[in-house]
Image: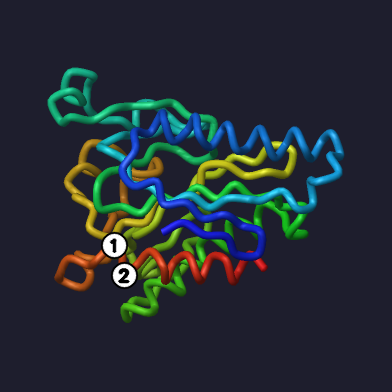
Amino acid sequence: MNFMSNNIVFRDLGTINYKDAWDYQDKLHSEIVTKKVNNAPEYEQFPEYILFVEHPHVYTLGKSGDEQNLLISALQLQAKDAEFFKTNRGGDITYHGPGQIVGYPIIDLDKHKIGVKKYVYILEESIIQTIKMFGLAGSRLEGATGVWLDAEIPGQARKICAIGVRVSRGVTMHGFAFNVNTNLAYFDYINPCGFTDKGVTSLSKELGQEISMEEVKPLLLSKLIALLK
């Protein structure tokens, strides 16, 4: 599923290693920034991108995160067939793995006349609107990015989507990780996003059955593109 809408190119990269996806994002980001700062004549028509991927098991740590929120050793990581990367995105530690839609929008916020706070709101809103299609009420939690269920109920708040972005020259990288059929046991080896008192969940856990990724992706993509108009 690859196409262009509103000058945004969508690419589903399938399953790809975290570092390969990071390098690809960086390449696309650099192309956009170079044309932008050089006032290239074709810049206004130069495409932006939304990438969807799944990653093999990997833990990633944001630039302001605490490595102590990874609760297992390098040997244990290897035994779990997982990798660990320090990244240049915002946020703390999170997990990516099979059954999770990871979205990497590479968007020029200036073109859309929005700031970083509004952009994060749009990412959250695209997930909230998507899970509503499955009968779930997602919401925001004050002081914490991402999308939550039962956010205001003590002891029941659980995150279904993590968000961590980087913005350079007004152009975004990194993005969101939406748990669809994710093996949530892998979250037991971290303090997700630095929290020790809140849980994680997935679409399949909440609905009690596995959900087709190919059903969810177009719904999520359509919500995201509509919100970015």
Label for residue 113? none
Q: Could you tell me which secondary element the residue under label 1 belongs to?
A: helix
Name the residue nearer the viewer: 36 or 57.
36
Q: Dot 1: few (<14), some (14–19), or many (≥20) neighbours within 10 Å? A: few
Residue at 39%, 37% in the rendered image? 93
Quarter the C terminus occupies: bottom right
Residue 47 vs 158, above or below: the answer is above
Quarter the N terminus occupies: bottom left
Residue at 26%, 38% in the rendered image? 56
Residue 87 vs 178, above or below: the answer is above
**Where's residue 185, x and y in %?**
17, 46
**Where's residue 9, x and y in %?**
57, 54
* Amino acid at the residue labelled 2: Glu
Label for residue 213? 1
Give the total number of marks visible in the rendering: 2
Residue at 31%, 56% in the rendered image? 179
Most extreme residue toward the top is: 75
Q: Dot 2: few (<14), some (14–19), or many (≥20) neighbours within 10 Å? A: few
Q: Could you tell me which secondary element the residue under label 2 belongs to?
A: helix
How far apart are labels 1 and 2 at the CA level?
A: 5 Å
Q: Are marks 1 and 2 in contact (CB under 8 Å)?
A: yes
**Where's residue 58, x and y in %?**
30, 34
Name the residue nearer the viewer: 104 or 39.
39
* Amino acid at the residue labelled 1: Met
Q: Is residue 50 left or right of residue 138?
A: right
Residue at 34%, 60% in the rendered image? 160
Name the residue nearer the viewer: 55 or 205.
55
Displayed quadrant of residue 26: top right
**Where's residue 63, x and y in %?**
52, 30
**Residue designated by label 2:** 215
Name the residue nearer the viewer: 124 or 171.
171
Q: Is residue 148 left or right of residue 40?
A: left
